[in-house]
Image: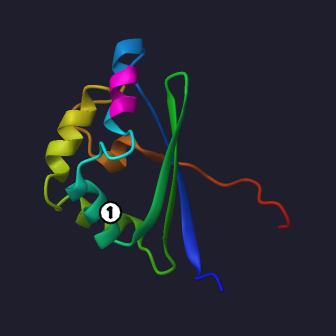
Amino acid sequence: MHLPILRFCKTMELRNDPALIEAYKKAHAKGAAWPEITQGMKDVGILDMEIYLIGTKLFMIMDTVADFDHDKAMAELATKPRQSEWEAHMSQFQDASADASADQKWQLMERIYKMGE
């Protein structure tokens, strides 16, 4: 039996610099993400997350608990240990203002098709 979940998809642009893109990939390699960041995501109800890359475009799939309130959870996540430090570190790779929050950088996408619906 599968538990009900919500899925959010987001996108963001990286800076068009092959060295920075490689460094971003290394920062997200298995075991490289800071444990406090992963724990903070779990604490706010994020069950799983994947990030994909093509060129400079990132695509995130975020699965959450069924009663997940996106805006509330993102605000809470921003207060978690080392989150602001992680965001500052990641900002060097992202084609966005360094002052932007993670929620401002990662743009929610609209689902326009689901097989069977």
Identify the residue position indicated by label 1 in the image.
Answer: 41
**Image quarter (top left, top right, bottom left or bottom right) of the C terminus:** bottom right
Residue depicted at x 47% and y 81%: 67
Residue 29 location, quadrant: top left
Residue depicted at x 14% and y 52%: 82
Q: Which residues are magenta?
A: 21-26
Q: Amino acid at mark 1?
A: Met
Residue 89 location, quadrant: top left
On the question of residue 83 being in view, the answer is: yes
Residue 24 lies in the magenta stretch: yes
35 up-or-down from 27: above or below: below
Q: Secondary structure at mark 1?
A: helix
Query: For this rendering, which residue is in front, 55 or 70?
Result: 55
Relative image position of residue 24 (x, y in whole percent):
35, 29
Relative image position of residue 16 (x, y in whole percent):
43, 15
Residue 61 lies in the magenta stretch: no
Q: How many marks?
A: 1
On the question of residue 17 being in view, the answer is: no
73 up-or-down from 97: above or below: below
Residue depicted at x 66% and y 86%: 1
Residue 72 location, quadrant: bottom left
